[in-house]
Amino acid sequence: RSSACVDNNRSSHLSHSLAFGCLSPRRVVEEARAGGEGCDWMISHMEMRDFFLFSCVTSDHLFYGLEGIPVSRRARKPNEWLPFGSAATSDLWARWTSGNTGLPLVDAAMAELAETGYCSNRVRQNA
């Protein structure tokens, strides 16, 4: 399995079931181990999922802040929020949600989401 390949339904499509608690990550890992070497990628994805969930919980409100999780003590210029609801942010929001950003990967992700109700992990991380 190519780690970048998402065509022809080469995705588990388990994200909904995992997110809503209908499927246990432990069960996924158990089945992947039984499936052999070709299923190792699924175990890796479950490990990443746990890492990011743990990072979110332990960083509390900082996870959703503009600066993100504090992973480095290096000083850097702080970002600034644009006021939500302003003409600038409303236009950006509308372009993003309709898949008209001009960024092909982001636009493809939003088109896939609008058409199928699903967005692959590969593009979800970037859109």
Image (spheres, rainbow, N blue to C red):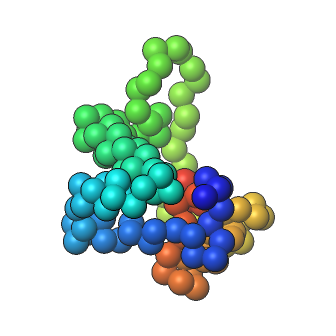
Residue 115 placement (x, y as % from top left): 58, 85
Q: Does the rendering let one see residue 3?
A: yes
Left/right placement of residue 2 relative to residue 117 reads right
Say which quadrant the C terminus sits in.
Answer: bottom right
Kindly identify the residue that appears in the image at 39 percent across and 50 percent down.
43
Kindly identify the residue that appears in the image at 41 percent across and 26 percent down.
70
Q: Nearer the viewer, residue 10 or 89?
A: 10
Q: Number of labelled discs?
A: 0
Kindly identify the residue that appears in the image at 50 percent across and 75 percent down.
118
Kindly identify the residue that appears in the image at 44 percent across and 72 percent down.
13
Q: Is residue 81 above or below residue 6?
A: above
Q: Residue furthest top?
A: 74
Q: Residue 26 lies in what quarter of the image? A: bottom left
Say which quadrant the N terminus sits in.
Answer: bottom right
Residue 111 placement (x, y as % from top left): 64, 77
Q: Nearer the viewer, residue 117 or 63?
A: 117
Q: Is residue 74 above or below residue 43?
A: above
Residue 23 placement (x, y as % from top left): 25, 68
Left/right placement of residue 11 relative to residue 101 reads left
Q: Nearer the viewer, residue 46 or 89?
A: 46
Q: Is residue 43 above or below residue 117?
A: above
Q: Does the rendering let one see residue 95?
A: no
Left/right placement of residue 90 relative to residue 42 reads right
Left/right placement of residue 62 relative to residue 86 reads left
Q: Residue 51 lies in what quarter of the image? A: top left
Q: Nearer the viewer, residue 61 or 36?
A: 36
Q: Residue 79 lies in what quarter of the image? A: top right
Residue 34 placement (x, y as % from top left): 33, 58
